[in-house]
Image (cartoon, rainbow, N blue to C red):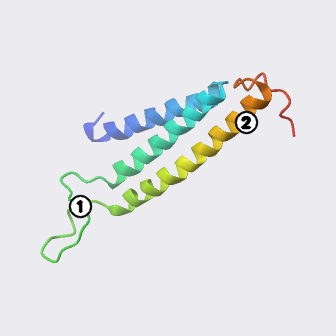
Amino acid sequence: MNNSYLPYFLCLVFFCVGLYGVLRKRNIIKIIIGLVICEYAANLFLVLVGYKMGGRSPLYSPDQSILDMVDPLPQALVLTSIVIGLATTALVVGIAIRIYEKYGTFDITKISKLKG
């Protein structure tokens, strides 16, 4: 494997670890941690897409070329994603706390009264 693809591969592995936590775990807290890992893997991927070897900050000045600038769009997307992810995580943790208060457990297999 070429070393230039190694960070992308590790990002994919990181995402798969989070996806495993979401799909295979039965504890609500572990599921939330898996969601957060998936979110961070997506953010890391966006940062990797915008990275340029030897690039400089995306501040334009007339005497410098724009060819060696780092792409600022993925950076803005990651900042927005972090804020949205924080709000989503806070909401899911709040729901998990309410479920624990009502049923006394975080195990989703023991919560049988959650039928529509």
Residue 82 in the image: state x and y as whole percent: 47, 50
Q: Image check: 1 left or right of 20?
A: left
Q: Quadrant of residue 52?
A: bottom left
Q: Quadrant of residue 107?
A: top right
Q: Residue 95 appears in which quarter of the rendering?
A: top right
- Direction left: furthest residue: 63
Percent x, y for residue 9? 38, 36
Residue placed at 31% from the left, 61% from the top?
A: 71
Say above or below: 1 vs 67.
above
Separation (CA) of disc 2 from disc 1: 45 Å
Which amino acid type corresponds to the residue marked 2 in the rendered image?
Arg
Q: Amino acid at mark 1?
A: Ser
Q: Residue at 57% across / 50% down in the picture?
A: 87
**Circle 1 sits in a helix, a strand or a loop, which is it?**
loop
> What number of labels is visible?
2
In the picture, measured across the screen, residue 3 lies left or right of residue 18, that is: left
Q: Where 109 falls versus 16 (above or below)?
A: above
| Residue 93 x %, y % | 63, 38
Horizontal placement of 107 versus 14: left or right? right
Which callout, 2 or 1, points at the residue further toward the start of the chain? 1
Residue drawn at point x = 36 percent, y = 52 percent: 49
Left or right placement of residue 23 versus residue 101 in this view = left
- Which of discs 2 and 1 lies nearer the camera? The answer is 2
| Rendered residue at 27%/37% (across/down) | 2
Q: Residues within 10 Å of mark 1 (few under 14, many from 20)?
A: few
Quadrant where the N terminus is found in the figure:
top left
Any mark on residue 29, and which?
none
User: What residue would you read off at disc 2?
Assistant: 98
The residue at which mark 1 appears reads as: 57
Residue 43: give x, y in percent of width and height.
44, 47
Q: Quadrant of the C terminus?
A: top right
